[in-house]
């Protein structure tokens, strides 16, 4: 895995990969380079079967404040074709994050606005500080959260999305938890400890089972109702026959940790 990125930092510990957005001088706002680097990284991560968890956070006081102003100024002069291409590059970034096969965790402190809130929506698990500031603020600039909307609507019910898309209100981590944008919120001083607890829980599961479990919701939602029981029966039958499942059962019966268990 390459480490010569300009806008992000990587730290690997065993089967965990920490990704840190590293443009604190602009509150980790997106520009063309960060979009390209994150997309490339997520696509590379998707090929690494040894990873069991990816953790995304921001350097400094903010998670990600959305689009970089300089980038937006340049985009203001784009024609339609350039704007479409630019939007598709951003959509590809979010889709690449969603398609990381192992569980992903977003650690949200400070601002997570616009596209930053989109990244939060793409994470499988997001934990926010109670005082974090999140929002879909695009309407304040005369645009809408079009690119991030499919990812936000995977988590946030329509009634809340309609409100916050239209008002551009900024809300705190507690409210983000209430509407489902984040999994939970905690006092800021407890944020890192809570994330570590969640990572530890992820690492207790079988590596293959955890990846399949991540995709199970989408599998069920995309399967016609008259086929769903066949799909689920086939899935559990396949997994029960694996060495991983045999080891998990043996470890349970023998009252020991399975071989895949990673200690903190």
Image (cartoon, helix red, strand yellow):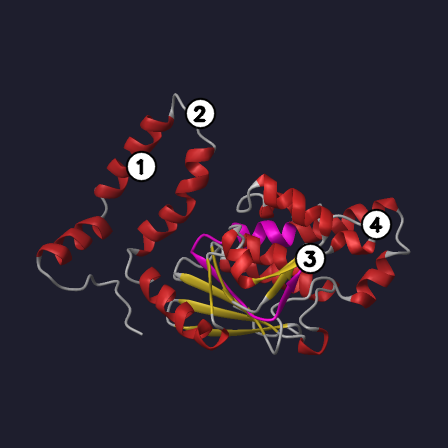
Q: Residue at x 31, y 37 (%)?
A: 235
Q: CA distance from mark 2 to mark 1?
A: 16 Å
Q: Earlier in the sequence, mark 2 or mark 4?
A: 4
Q: Which region shows up in magenta?
A: 92-115
Q: Where's residue 39, x and y in %?
A: 62, 58
Check disc 3: other Cα within 10 Å, few if <14, some if 14-19, many if 20+. Answer: many
Which residue is under mark 2? 224
Q: Earlier in the sequence, mark 2 or mark 1?
A: 2
Check disc 1: other Cα within 10 Å, few if <14, some if 14-19, many if 20+. Answer: few
Q: Earlier in the sequence, mark 1 or mark 3?
A: 3
Mark 3 or 2: the one toward you? 3
Q: CA distance from mark 2 to mark 4?
A: 38 Å
Secondary-structure class at tag 1: helix
Which residue is under mark 1? 235
Mark 2 or 4: the one toward you? 2
Q: Residue at x 56, y 53 (%)?
A: 121
Q: Which residue lies most toward the left here?
A: 254
Which residue is under mark 3? 114
Examine the image and state in which quarter residue 13 appears. bottom left
């Amino acid at each position: 895995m390459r480490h010569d990125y300009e806008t992000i930092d990587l730290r690997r510990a065993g089967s965990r990969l920490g990704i840190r957005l590293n443009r604190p001088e602009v509150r980790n706002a997106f520009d063309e380079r960060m979009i390209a680097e994150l997309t490339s990284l997520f696509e590379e991560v998707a090929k690494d079967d040894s990873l069991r968890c990816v953790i995304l956070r921001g350097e400094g006081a903010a998670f990600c404040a959305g689009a970089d102003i300089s980038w937006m100024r340049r985009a203001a002069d784009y024609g339609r074709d350039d704007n479409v291409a630019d939007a598709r590059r951003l959509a590809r970034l979010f889709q690449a994050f969603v398609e990381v096969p192992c569980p992903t965790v977003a650690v949200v402190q400070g601002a997570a606005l616009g596209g930053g809130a989109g990244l939060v929506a793409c994470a499988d698990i997001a934990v926010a500080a109670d005082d974090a500031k999140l929002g879909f603020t695009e309407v304040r600039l005369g645009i809408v959260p079009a690119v991030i909307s499919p990812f936000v609507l995977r988590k946030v019910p329509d009634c809340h999305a309609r409100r916050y898309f239209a008002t551009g209100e900024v809300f705190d981590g507690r409210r983000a938890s209430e509407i489902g944008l984040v999994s939970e919120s905690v006092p800021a001083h407890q944020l890192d400890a809570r994330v570590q607890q969640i990572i530890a829980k992820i690492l207790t599961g079988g590596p293959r089972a955890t990846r399949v479990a991540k995709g199970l919701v989408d599998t069920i939602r995309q399967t016609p109702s008259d086929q769903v029981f066949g799909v689920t029966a086939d899935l559990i039958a396949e997994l029960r026959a694996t060495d991983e499942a045999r080891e998990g059962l043996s470890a349970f019966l023998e009252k020991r940790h399975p071989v895949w268990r990673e200690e903190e």
